Amino acid sequence: MPEQPTFKGKSSLHGMKAWLASLGHSDSVLDSLNIIHVAGTKGKGSTCAFTSFFLNAHRQRTGYPGKIGLYTSPHLKRVQERIQINCKPVSEELFTRYVFEVWDSLNAQGLPKPRYLQLLMLVSVHTFIREGVEVAIYETHNGGEYDATNVFPKPVVTGIASIGEDHIKQLGPTIENIAWHKAGIFKSGRPAFSAMQEPEIAAVLRLRANDKDAPLNFVNLDSSLPMNTPTLQPDVQKTNASLALALVSTFLQEKAPACSRDLSAQDIDLGVEQFVWIGRFQKVNQEGHQWFLDGAHNDMSVQNAAHWFAEMATLEQTHFDPVHTVIFSHISERNGASLLQRIARSLREHNMSIHYLIISTYVERNEGTNDADQSLQRSAQIFSDEMRQLYIDTWKNIFPRTQTAFEPTIDGALKLARSFDQGAGTQNLITGSLYLVGGALRILEPHV
């Protein structure tokens, strides 16, 4: 492993300190946010959400912390989802006010303009400071060392969720390189925790922790979790919740008043019960159609999504046989055919019969509309004929009898899946991209 792997592209950390200082947010002000910082490949968002819900359950019982900030990315339905207080997205009015406060301040000082994710990060910090949060949970965008969120000099605690191959062009090429970047959030003297990792990844994390003088512990499954609840049925969520418990317990021991430093069994049960994380292991029931949605978009996560779909579909199946459909879309640097192969193999291992595969795009409706703010981040390109055929051939190598179709819009894919119903209903896995899942949710639940 190189001593310091290179970062391809422009560091999103560049400029962040200057912009924050121009807004009046010094390092001491940042420290007052009591940061819990989380990186990783799969599960970092869920870990942050579990952390927020456990703390919120503790707040409901003890009154501490009074306000809990949560910053994650990307959003699925509305951009305000990225900035939450006490497990709820900030209002559109509040979000708009703080966006303009930040933008107008930077503009008045003639400073270079931040990019999209940098701006949202600045807005989150500004929001949490103005709203007086007592703890702020931050999910990295990607990587860690050069990530825009890595501006906090003294986080209370840091955490690393499961690490796999992701953002290889920026962070790779090796898994050791990727782990090096993720561990960049470790800070001197501040406790760090990690989910259990593969040996070569764990070795890098230990080296980085030692170099940064950060005490590191690896977290096994926590037996205090209510393991049989539906929320924790995907095994990976047990891992994420266990890591979150370690982060919460460390935070409370260091920052909570003496009378409320313990996370009770009641807090844990309530946190799991109230946990909601849209687009991740989410099920929507609609008039005989079951939609299983997970925004998995790397090899590790799509395998987990397929495993979850197979288990849940079997558990919820009646004596009738519903039609099984997979709706998939993936347009990015990653190898979509490899992801589709992982999904197919996992479903085959669970003896699932998949009747239809629908390949779609990120375009929501026939008029070509998308969620406006997400269009800033992604290309509106559709699959080429070659890519489409590659995906179909990849799938049919494992499920040769599956009927395949291409639908250029998400709305069209959902309508097509409904049309396959033979009277016993349908069970549909929607995966491959958070953009696909976000678009599907905006159509399936337009008023939620």
Image (cartoon, rainbow, N blue to C red):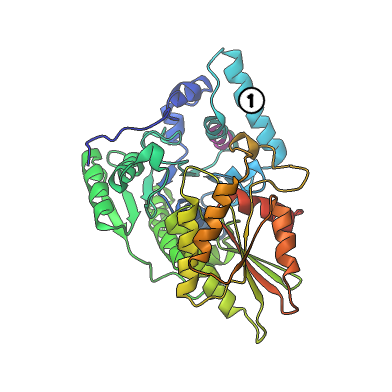
Please provide percent x and percent y for residue 164.
37, 52
Q: Quick one: SS at disc 1?
A: helix
Q: In the figure, is residue 299 to the left or right of 429?
A: left
Question: Total label count?
Answer: 1
Front in this rendered view, residue 31 or 188: 188
Q: Residue furthest bottom?
A: 319
**Residue at the image point whose x is 77% and y is 54% from the top:** 447
Can residue 63 be seen in this snapshot?
no
Q: Quadrant of residue 316?
A: bottom right
Q: Quadrant of residue 258?
A: bottom left
Residue annotated with mark 1: 101
Q: Which residues are magenta?
A: 124-129
Front in this rendered view, residue 77 or 72: 77
Q: In the image, what residue type sits under mark 1? A: Glu
Can residue 41 be seen in this snapshot?
yes
Please provide percent x and percent y for residue 379.
60, 37
Front in this rendered view, residue 326 or 439: 326
